[in-house]
Each structure stands twice: as structure tokens, then as C-alpha cells.
């Protein structure tokens, strides 16, 4: 495998080596190029330096910004800038250069530190500045993330795709494929198993509150036991029609009405019971993935998270590779602490980094990535596959996502195909019933049929995507030399 030759500013690597190397690994491995780190004086494909005018021959020269790397959390988003096919985050108080990108004697010069922009996005530098809503969700009201629809643009992977196109235009060799089978994108769906069994006296009240008195009949059917939320076989048959296999994320900590009232809103079912054991084995035998829906407070203690993983593995009779937190409830003050627990417990991937109310990619990447632990200055070992759409965002939370629902989802699909990324969505187990949840299931189907119509989309389970991406990343790292800081 031929290596891309990259030279990095030695002073910045000396000061910010783990951060810089991690960012460039994300970019190059995500694109699909093995790399060789070489001195600034060598002939290169990419140079990243504070003094572009002093570089030798290179296809692409990017000006580094040492001031930004000194204090990345000081930067605040103002808007999305755009020039020559490049979209990037523009920060408050930033002076705009007359031109950011231009050709000079056969090489491409970029006056903007795109590596810093990617680091800033992927590490969520601005998240600590936003107020918290219930369950620790970030309140993005009035921010550029909403007014500029930043989350839907996936700026980190969009910058990477720009670099890929630019080097291809300059004659660099094509990267290895991102996805198997000649596909240009990937898609997966997961079902959070929250309420497979209803409390028959309580659920009718919830239905009437949500839908009104005209739904009294289905509410009574729930009360009498003639209508349930137990839809596993229905989902399996439905997705067989779509030609896909999904993941089901089961909670293994049994909650109660009392604990719910006291601030610990975990699902009420027990995966150790025979009916759940049977459905777990049935799902597994048919090629569906079993993942953990971590409990509301699991982020507080790795031993709790480990116990929940082991409980689900015992009930299902198989190992559990993926996790997704109930209510997306990470440590809101230090999400990286929760992500590091995933690594310690042994999860292959997580998909909990999401903004509850807003469509799009929280950390700006349609590509899976290994998060960076800023306090320990290292890459973490559990892959993050970010969710772009949770079903509720276009129904109960529709006011946060104004516009025609399907057009918004098709826009996400187009973005993923454009960037060669992955579209992961969350459709809750209980919304199968079109009477109680009108249009919810149909919206998911329309999105999946639209993706199929685009062609070149690999439909897989989240585990299959994680397994492919991690194997591909390992292969590229083994074929490369350098950019090794921050790997433990």
C-alpha cells in the first residue's frame, strides 16, 4: 500500500503532538490513505506548517495556526464559512482572509488551519459553554448550530472530503474504499427497547395525553390487553421486507415506578425472564444485533456498566459489542469520562453522542471515529458511530426541526452519500404501531427506501459497521509510519 507523505510543523508537534497526530489520523485513515510522516524539507503530498513559504515541493500546503492550538476552548462558533467548495466553522472575532484556497505553481495553498477546525469540532470544544436542559441535554437555542444548521453539515468529515477531492484533483492516488462491496456509504438502524411491556393502567393515560380523546378506543385496547408494545416479530418481518437487519438495545437494569419518580427513569422489564431470553435468542438467530441500552446512571460507575453488560450477555447467550445510553445520559460535565468507561468495560462501539432535540451529527462527522481523551491526551479505543436522527426529533420535538420531515431526512441521506459516511438512526421499539404512533414507522421506511434508490449504500448492523471500520483503521495504521502520538 503506497503511503501519503505528510510533513508537520515540528514546533507544534512538540507542543501539541497527541492532539495533532490524532486529528491527522482521523483525516487520513478516514479518507483511506496510509501515511508516512517526513521532515518539512522532504518532498511531500501534504505540508502543515506555520511558514508555508519555507516549504519544499508539496501538492497541498496548509497554514497552521499556533494561537488556536494553545487554547481551543476559547473559540466560539459564529457561522459557517464557504469558499471554493470548502465549508468550515468561522469563529467569533475572526478576521476573514481575502482568499483561503488558491493554486500556485501546481500546488494547492490553504491559508486556514483545517486540522484545528477538525480537532475543535470532533472534541466538542464549545459544548461546556452551553446551558443544560433536563437529563443534561445541551440547550442550543439561539445558537449558530441551529440558525446555520451546522449539525446537519457534518463539517469535520466535510473538510476531510474536501481534502480528499483536492488531492485527487492534484493527481494523488485514490484511497482504499471506505465501505465494502464497492459501496459509497453505509446505513444502519437501532431500536432502543424502552417499553416492550406497558403498565396497562398507566399507558392509556399517556396515550390520551399525547393524542387526545379521539384515541380513546386504542387506549382502551391497551387497557384491556388487546393492543401491546411487544413488536419484535413485527419489526423483524418489516425489516426483512426492507432487506435489512437492525440492532435492538436492551436495558438490563430493571427500573420501577418508584425509582422513576425519584429521578432514575429506567425501563421496567427484566431481561432475565424467560420471554425476554427467548426473544433475545430469536433475534440473534435471525442475524439481528443485540446491544446494551445502558441505564440512566450507568455513566457514574464503570462497575455498574460492566454488570449491566454481563447481565445482558448472560440473558442473550452472546457477547455484547455495542452500547447506547438511555436518555443519551452521559456525564454532561465530562462526556469523555463516560466514553473512557466504554473502553474499560470492553465495548467495541458506542452511539450516544447526540443532541437530543436536533437532527444532525453532534461532533460534525458522518464517519465513525475514535474519540480523543483531552485530559489524558490520547485516543480512546471504543469507536463512536454518531446518530443523525432519533425518531422523536420529527414528532414530539418537531418544533426544534422545522420543515418538511422527509425532506430533512433525505438531506441527511444526501450528506452521507456525498461524504462517503454512515447514516445511523434510532427508531424506538414501541413506535411500530401506526395507530398509536402515526407516521413514525412509515417515516423510517421512506428514508430507507430513499437510501436504496440512491444506490451504493451498504445496509448493515452497527456492529458490522464498527467491525469493518476498526479493521480498516488497523490495516491503515499497520501500513503507515509516524503520526503515532496519543496511541496507548
Image (cartoon, helix red, strand yellow):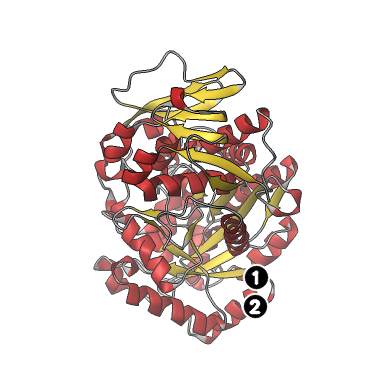
Residue 462 percent across, percent down from the top left = 58, 60
Residue 481 percent across, percent down from the top left = 54, 52
Task: Determine whether the residue tagged by mark 2 lies in a helix, strand or loop.
Answer: helix
In this image, 311 relative to 3: left or right? left
Query: In the rendered image, which quarter contains the C terminus?
Result: bottom left
Residue 283 percent across, percent down from the top left = 63, 73
Q: Does 234 sit above or below residue 417?
A: below
Q: Mark 1 points at which residue?
A: 233
Task: Determine whether the residue tagged by mark 1 lies in a helix, strand or loop.
Answer: helix
Q: Does 274 sit above or below residue 204?
A: below
Front disc: 2 or 1: 2
Residue at x 63%, y 43% (from the top left corner): 420
Q: Mark 2 points at which residue?
A: 282
Residue at x 51%, y 32% (from the top left corner): 403
The foreground one among 4 and 210 is: 4
Which quadrant of the figure has residue 188?
A: bottom right
Amino acid at each position: 500500500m503506497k503511503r501519503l507523505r505528510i510533513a508537520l510543523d515540528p514546533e507544534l508537534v512538540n507542543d501539541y503532538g497527541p492532539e495533532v497526530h490524532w486529528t491527522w489520523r482521523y483525516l487520513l485513515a478516514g479518507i483511506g490513505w496510509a501515511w508516512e510522516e517526513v521532515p518539512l524539507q522532504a518532498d511531500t503530498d501534504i505540508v502543515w506548517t506555520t511558514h508555508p513559504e519555507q516549504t519544499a515541493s508539496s501538492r497541498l500546503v496548509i497554514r497552521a495556526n499556533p494561537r488556536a492550538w494553545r487554547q481551543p476552548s476559547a473559540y466560539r462558533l459564529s457561522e459557517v464559512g464557504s469558499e471554493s467548495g470548502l465549508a468550515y466553522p468561522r469563529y467569533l472575532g475572526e478576521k476573514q482572509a481575502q482568499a483561503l484556497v488558491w493554486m500556485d505553481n501546481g500546488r494547492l495553498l490553504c491559508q486556514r488551519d483545517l486540522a484545528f477546525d477538525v480537532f475543535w469540532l470532533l472534541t466538542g470544544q464549545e459544548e461546556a459553554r452551553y446551558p443544560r436542559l433536563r437529563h443534561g441535554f445541551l440547550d442550543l437555542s439561539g445558537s449558530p448550530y441551529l440558525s446555520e444548521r451546522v449539525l446537519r453539515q457534518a463539517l469535520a468529515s466535510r473538510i476531510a472530503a474536501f481534502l480528499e477531492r483536492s488531492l485527487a484533483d492534484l493527481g494523488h492516488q485514490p484511497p482504499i474504499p471506505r465501505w465494502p462491496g464497492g459501496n459509497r456509504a453505509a446505513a444502519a438502524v437501532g431500536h432502543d427497547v424502552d417499553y416492550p411491556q406497558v403498565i396497562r393502567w398507566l399507558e392509556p393515560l399517556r396515550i390520551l395525553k399525547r393524542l387526545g380523546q379521539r384515541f380513546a378506543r386504542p387506549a382502551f385496547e391497551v387497557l384491556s390487553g388487546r393492543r401491546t408494545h411487544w413488536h419484535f416479530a413485527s419489526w423483524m418481518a418489516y425489516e426483512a421486507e426492507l432487506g435489512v437487519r437492525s440492532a435492538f438495545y436492551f436495558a438490563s437494569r430493571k427500573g420501577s415506578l418508584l425509582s422513576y419518580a425519584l429521578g432514575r427513569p429506567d425501563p421496567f422489564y427484566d431481561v432475565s425472564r424467560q420471554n425476554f431470553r427467548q426473544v433475545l435468542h430469536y433475534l440473534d438467530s435471525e442475524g439481528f444485533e443485540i446491544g446494551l441500552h445502558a441505564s440512566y446512571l450507568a455513566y457514574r460507575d464503570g462497575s455498574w456498566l460492566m454488570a449491566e453488560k454481563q447481565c445482558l450477555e448472560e440473558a442473550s447467550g452472546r457477547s455484547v459489542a455495542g452500547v447506547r445510553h438511555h436518555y443519551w445520559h452521559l456525564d454532561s460535565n465530562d462526556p469523555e469520562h463516560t466514553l473512557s468507561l466504554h473502553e474499560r468495560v470492553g465495548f467495541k462501539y458506542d452511539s450516544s453522542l447526540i443532541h437530543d432535540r436536533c437532527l444532525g451529527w453532534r461532533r460534525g462527522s458522518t464517519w465513525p471515529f475514535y474519540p480523543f481523551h483531552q485530559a489524558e491526551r490520547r485516543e480512546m479505543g471504543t469507536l463512536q458511530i454518531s446518530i443523525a436522527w432519533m425518531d422523536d426529533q420529527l414528532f414530539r420535538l418537531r418544533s426544534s426541526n422545522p420543515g418538511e420531515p422527509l425532506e430533512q431526512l433525505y438531506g441527511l441521506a444526501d450528506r452521507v452519500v456525498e461524504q462517503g459516511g454512515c447514516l445511523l438512526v434510532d427508531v424506538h421499539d414501541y413506535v411500530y404501531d401506526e395507530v398509536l404512533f402515526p407516521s413514525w414507522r412509515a417515516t423510517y421506511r421512506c428514508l430507507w427506501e430513499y437510501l436504496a434508490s440512491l444506490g451504493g449504500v451498504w445496509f448493515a448492523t452497527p456492529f458490522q459497521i464498527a467491525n469493518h471500520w476498526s479493521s480498516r483503521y488497523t490495516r491503515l495504521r499497520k501500513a503507515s509510519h509516524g503520526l503515532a502520538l496519543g496511541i496507548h
